[in-house]
């Protein structure tokens, strides 16, 4: 299966449902974390999971989905850095940026707007 082919709808739907399920579970168990930093990290990873899940149905190719998942993994690393080392600027920037990019993905798809056409 080449990475640049069109994203199948069932795969996009699966990523959507899994992203939301992971996010809801992480948000639910974050209060059980042993300290506040770990709880905040769980909430932040939930934000990333929901953001990737929300954007998945609006992506056009499997390559786009792989890029979104890779950015999600980078976001997890940056959230770990920001949450556990108390770098509030990175944490709050990512808390705003991840959902914004997910919403922009949907908006660009609906408007058929291309950045790199």
Image (cartoon, helix red, strand yellow):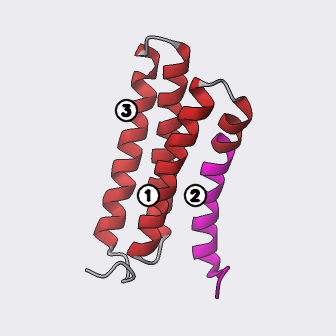
Q: Main secondary structure of the magenta part?
A: helix
Quadrant of the rendered structure where residue 26 is? top left
Q: Which mark is residue 25?
A: 3
Of mark 3 and mark 2, the one earlier in the sequence is: 3
Whole-percent x and y of residue 31?
46, 16
Does residue 40 appear left or right of residue 94 in this picture? left
Residue 84 inside the magenta-drawn segment:
no
For the point 34% across and 62% down, the residue is 13
Residues at marks 3 and 1, CA–CA distance in whole angstroms: 19 Å
Label 3 vs 1, first from the N-terminus: 3
Under circle 1, the secondary element is helix
* Above-or-below relation of 69 to 58: above
Please provide the residue range marked out in magenta: 95-117
Q: Which residue is mark 1?
A: 69
Relative height, residue 112 to residue 94 (above, below): below
Q: Mark 2 sits on what residue?
A: 102
- The one nearer the camera, 100 or 117, is 117
> Hey, which quadrant is residue 83 in on the image?
top right
Q: Position of residue 29 (x, y in %)?
A: 39, 23
Callout 1–callout 2 Cβ contact below 8 Å: no
Mark nearest the camera among 3 and 1 is: 1
- SS class of the residue under badge 3? helix
């Amino acid at each position: 299966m080449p990475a640049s082919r069109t994203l199948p709808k069932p795969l996009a739907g699966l990523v959507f449902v899994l992203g939301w399920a992971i996010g809801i579970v992480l948000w639910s168990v974050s209060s059980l974390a042993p300290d506040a930093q770990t709880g905040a990290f769980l909430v932040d990873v939930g934000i990333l999971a929901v953001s990737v899940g929300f954007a998945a149905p609006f992506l056009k190719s499997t390559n786009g989905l792989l890029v979104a998942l890779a950015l999600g993994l980078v976001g997890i690393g940056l959230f770990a850095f920001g949450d556990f080392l108390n770098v509030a600027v990175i944490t709050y920037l990512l808390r705003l940026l991840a959902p914004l990019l997910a919403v922009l993905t949907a908006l660009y798809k609906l408007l058929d707007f291309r950045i790199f056409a």
